[in-house]
């Protein structure tokens, strides 16, 4: 593995929960991996398998989707739809020889900043363990 490997983590976060938890983590001065790029969505139900795969193609080493707790989605079942998209994308990754654990879905409440931090750190740990994503087409800036 290259010594200068700096893992890139992309997190698709719901405005109502995970994004709020990320904001709160900042206010609480909780530390988490600095290489996490957050993509804010109104609901994780907007995430498509294509967005997840494109993130890998564009340079992410690991990707996560963080939505509301099950039963708490502001758009009823958006987080359940996202969960299905993540499962589908994991299967596709596996089929092309990419470790499916490079992708994960989390359910994080708006006030659960420690859970957001734990999710970021978990994904960073996976990125370090798995090494650079072999699908990288160009470097994420
Ligand atoms: Fe948060 Fe749907 S509003 S996942």
Image (cartoon, rainbow, N blue to C red):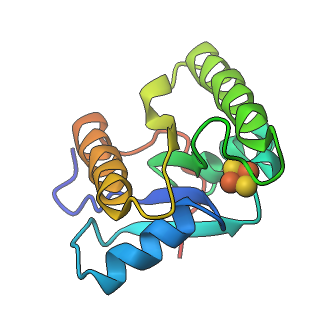
In the displayed structure image, the side of residue 24 where residue 125 appears, left or right: left
In the rendered view, would you say 116 is above or below 23?
above
Please tell me which residue lies in front, 7 or 73.
73
Q: Residue at x 72, y 47 (%)?
A: 73
Q: Residue at x 55, y 41 (%)?
A: 135
Query: Would residue 139 be visible to someone looking at this image?
Result: no
Q: Quadrant of the N terminus?
A: top left
Residue lying furthest bottom: 27
In the displayed structure image, the side of residue 101 where residue 46 appears, left or right: right
In the displayed structure image, the side of residue 136 where residue 88 appears, left or right: right
Please tell me which residue lies in front, 53 or 44.
44
Residue 25: image quadrant is bottom left
The image shows residue 75 at horizontal and vertical percentages of 83, 50
The image shows residue 107 at horizontal and vertical percentages of 52, 42
Q: Residue at x 50, y 36 (%)?
A: 104
Query: Would residue 114 be visible to someone looking at this image?
Result: yes
In the rendered view, would you say 87 is above or below 121?
above
């Amino acid at each position: 593995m290259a010594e200068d490997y700096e893992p890139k983590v992309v997190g698709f976060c719901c405005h109502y929960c995970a994004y709020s938890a990320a904001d709160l983590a900042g206010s609480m001065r909780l530390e988490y991996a600095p290489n996490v790029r957050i993509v804010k969505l109104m609901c994780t139900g907007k995430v498509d398998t294509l967005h997840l795969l494109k993130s890998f193609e564009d340079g992410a080493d690991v990707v996560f989707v963080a939505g509301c707790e099950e039963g708490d989605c502001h758009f009823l079942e958006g987080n359940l739809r996202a969960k299905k998209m993540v499962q589908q994308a994991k299967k596709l990754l596996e089929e092309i020889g990419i470790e499916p654990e490079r992708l994960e879905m989390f359910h994080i409440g708006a006030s659960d900043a420690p859970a957001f931090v734990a999710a970021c750190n978990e994904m960073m740990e996976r990125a370090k363990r798995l090494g650079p994503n072999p699908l990288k087409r160009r470097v994420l800036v």
